[in-house]
Image (spheres, grey):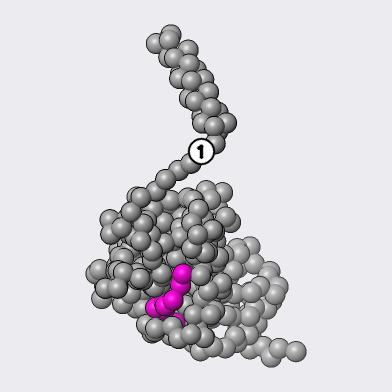
């Protein structure tokens, strides 16, 4: 059975309970201390105090103590985050109060209605490392987004910091033109376009706005798979920000995990992939497909003409 410390509180508000806790110097150094608070009406509140949350065991107050604590905690996290970001002016910061926030938080799956604590946009691997270190130091939950095309919208989580990787989109082609190092925020059409400028290609998917790195790490089927293999087959190197916030080059054991398990082992800031010469693309269509396209185009043009005629 849990051991409780009992403190008297005055009134019936949740703020009174919080004040009583704060006045008795509770800390959360990896522990979850317990307390029993007694209000003036004789009711008891048994609560477990976690570092970022309160789990209500019994509540005899007119105000929800847990909700009040969460709002207080969120405000404190934002204050701490903003103080941290003052030392990193290169990191773009979009708080909930910003007019850019609604668009910045929105994933591809618009049914995902979670609101992140804030959105940050690192401009370099060093920025990513600094954010991860801050998050670990302050027990701050975070998510990672590149293209944001997860079917369930899991790149966004309620009250978690959203790290938007889109600014990391550089492509560096090796001197032997056999590999390219691709940063973690690049989209598939961006990668294809940059490689095409050099007469090169690598397997990509069919949807241009999907983030390339996530697509490749979790399998990577696409139009070139029959010729060159899956996206995951192309990965020969990676740079990761590990859970401690350190930038590390993946060894072969870590690469085996990344090929299939993706970002489970850290934030992927770049991967090195095989590339192949490609100077032209030919598309062959069967006669019946061509006829179908011609019929559809004719029908579409006729439909638009009928629609616009009254105007």
Please identify the quadrant where the C terminus is shown: top left
Helix, strand, or loop for circle 1? Answer: loop
Q: Nearer the viewer, residue 6 or 238?
A: 238
- Rendered location of residue 224, percent (x, y): 48, 56
Residue at 24% from the left image edge and 69% from the top image edge: 89
- Rendered location of residue 27, percent (x, y): 50, 87
Q: Nearer the viewer, residue 29 or 259?
A: 259
Q: Is residue 282 visible?
A: yes
Please identify the quarter of the rendering in which residue 197 is found: bottom left
* Residue 248 against residue 307 in the figure, above or below: below
151 in the magenta segment: no
* Residue 209 against residue 290 in the figure, above or below: below
**Residue farthest to the top, as pictured:** 310
Please identify the quadrant where the N terminus is shown: bottom right
- Rendered location of residue 57, percent (x, y): 70, 75
| Numbered-mark total | 1
Q: Main secondary structure of the magenta part?
A: strand
Q: Describe residue 149's horizontal placement relative to residue 57 as left or right.
A: left
Residue at 45% from the left image edge and 65% from the top image edge: 213
> Counting other residues with Cα less than 10 Å from the Cα at mark 1, is it few (<14), some (14-19), or many (20 or more)?
few
The magenta stretch spans which residues?
234-242
**Residue farthest to the right, as pictured:** 1
Q: Is residue 23 visible?
A: no
Q: Describe residue 266's horizontal placement relative to residue 248 as left or right.
A: right
Q: Describe residue 204's horizontal placement relative to residue 63 as left or right.
A: left
- Rendered location of residue 121, percent (x, y): 34, 64
Q: Nearer the viewer, residue 127 or 6?
A: 127
Residue at 53% from the left image edge and 50% from the top image edge: 109
């Amino acid at each position: 059975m849990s051991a409780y410390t009992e403190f008297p509180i005055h009134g019936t508000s949740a703020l009174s309970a919080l004040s009583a806790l704060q006045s008795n110097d509770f800390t959360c150094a990896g522990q979850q201390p317990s307390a029993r608070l007694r209000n003036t009406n004789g009711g008891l509140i048994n609560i477990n105090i976690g570092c970022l949350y309160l789990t209500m065991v019994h509540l005899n107050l007119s105000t929800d103590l847990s909700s009040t604590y969460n709002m207080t905690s969120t405000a404190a996290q934002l204050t701490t985050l903003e103080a941290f970001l003052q030392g990193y002016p290169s990191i773009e910061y979009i708080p909930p109060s910003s007019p850019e926030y609604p668009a910045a938080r929105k994933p591809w799956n618009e049914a995902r209605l979670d609101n992140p604590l804030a959105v940050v946009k690192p401009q370099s691997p060093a920025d990513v490392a600094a954010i991860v270190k801050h998050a670990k130091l302050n027990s701050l939950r975070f998510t990672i987004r590149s293209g944001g095309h997860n079917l369930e919208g899991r790149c966004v989580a309620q009250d978690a910091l959203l790290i938007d990787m889109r600014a990391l989109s550089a492509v560096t082609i090796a001197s032997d033109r056999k590999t390219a190092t691709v940063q973690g925020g690049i989209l598939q059409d961006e990668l294809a376009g940059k490689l095409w400028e050099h007469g090169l290609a690598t397997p990509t998917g069919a949807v241009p706005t999907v983030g390339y790195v996530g697509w490749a790490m979790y399998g990577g089927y696409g139009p070139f798979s029959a010729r060159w293999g899956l996206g995951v087959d192309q990965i020969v190197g990676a740079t990761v920000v590990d859970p401690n916030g350190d930038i590390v080059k993946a060894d072969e054991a870590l690469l085996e995990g990344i090929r299939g398990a993706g970002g489970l082992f850290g934030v992927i800031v770049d991967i090195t992939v095989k590339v192949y010469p490609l100077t032209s693309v030919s598309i062959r269509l069967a006669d019946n497909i061509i006829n179908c396209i011609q019929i559809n185009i004719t029908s579409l043009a006729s439909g638009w003409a009928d629609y616009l005629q009254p105007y």
